[in-house]
């Protein structure tokens, strides 16, 4: 019996493999016909959650849409991405002022800072002109009980149909994971900081 693979050239085998792959991709595109905004959760212990979210916001802006960002936790910490993005006319940007909760060590101060910025965050979720909204480090607000999951869910439920929302931070709760359309759990294998390398501008922030 003749081995068809042995008779075919590497170029033929590559073409056949790519044709099968294209058929799978085309079928997936054909199935995905619903048009609406999505909720994306970027979580896990690995580096790059916020950077990925900022990259998606830049993609939104690059297509001429408007976007919004609310930064929780990092209020007093310089951030290279927002140094650039906050200068753009088609981006709304808000920051929770108290900074890292482990630095303030003052629960009431953190709660007051959250209570001040949360109405602005909810307003973004009601703004039909914002194609993408990013809540950076929002999972900490859930973990530290500054924000109830039910209140976040209600705000997400009532947002404009075509609005996308990106939620970042470690330890995303199971309810949020189940609610989201897309969940990426970033795993850390190695990190320079844990190896004793000092954190640096342009890489860590």
Image (tube, grey):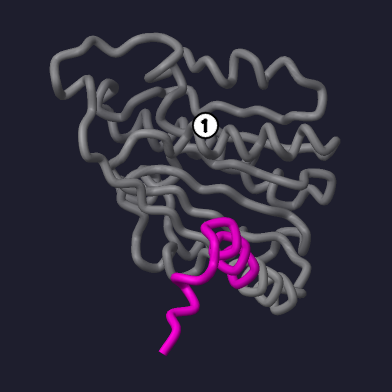
Residue occupying the point 46% across, 30% down: 113
Query: Where does residue 48 sit, x and y in percent of width and height?
Result: 41, 34
Q: Is residue 191 left or right of 67 when viewed as pictured?
A: left
Which percent across, then down, holds residue 26?
Answer: 71, 71
Count of numbered tags: 1
The residue shown at (35%, 10%) is 200
Residue 15 on the magenta span: yes
Magenta-colored span: 1-20
Q: Position of residue 66 (x, y in %)?
A: 80, 37
Residue 31 in which image quadrant: bottom right
Residue drawn at x 66%, y 28% as measured from the top left:
93
Identify whether 2 is placed above or below 90: below
Percent of width and height locating residue 101: 31, 29
Residue name at image x 48 percent, y 53 percent: 41
Residue 43 counted in the magenta span: no
Q: Quadrant of the C terminus?
A: top left
47 left or right, relative to 119? left
| Residue behind mark 1 | 71
Q: In which quarter of the image is residue 110?
A: top left
Mark 1 nearby-residue class (10 Å; few <14, some 14–19, many ≥20): many
Element marked by disc 1 = strand
């Amino acid at each position: 019996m003749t081995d068809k693979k042995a008779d075919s050239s590497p170029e033929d085998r590559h073409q056949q493999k790519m044709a099968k792959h294209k058929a799978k991709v085309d079928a997936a595109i054909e199935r995905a016909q619903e048009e609406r905004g999505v909720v994306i959760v970027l979580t896990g212990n690995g580096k790059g959650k916020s950077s990925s979210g900022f990259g998606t916001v830049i993609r939104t802006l690059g297509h001429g849409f408007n976007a919004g960002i609310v930064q929780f936790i990092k209020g007093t910490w310089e951030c290279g991405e927002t140094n650039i993005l906050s200068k753009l006319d088609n981006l709304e940007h808000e920051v929770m002022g108290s900074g890292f909760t482990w630095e303030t060590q003052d629960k009431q101060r953190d709660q007051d800072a959250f209570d001040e910025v949360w109405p602005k965050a909810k307003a973004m979720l009601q703004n039909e002109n914002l194609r993408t909204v990013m809540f950076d480090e929002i999972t900490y607000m859930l973990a530290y009980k500054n924000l109830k999951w039910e209140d976040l869910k209600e705000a997400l439920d009532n947002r404009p149909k075509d609005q996308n929302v990106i939620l970042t931070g470690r330890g995303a709760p199971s309810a949020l994971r189940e609610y989201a359309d897309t969940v990426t759990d970033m795993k850390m294998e190695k990190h320079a900081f844990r190896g004793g390398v000092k954190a640096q501008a342009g890489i860590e922030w």
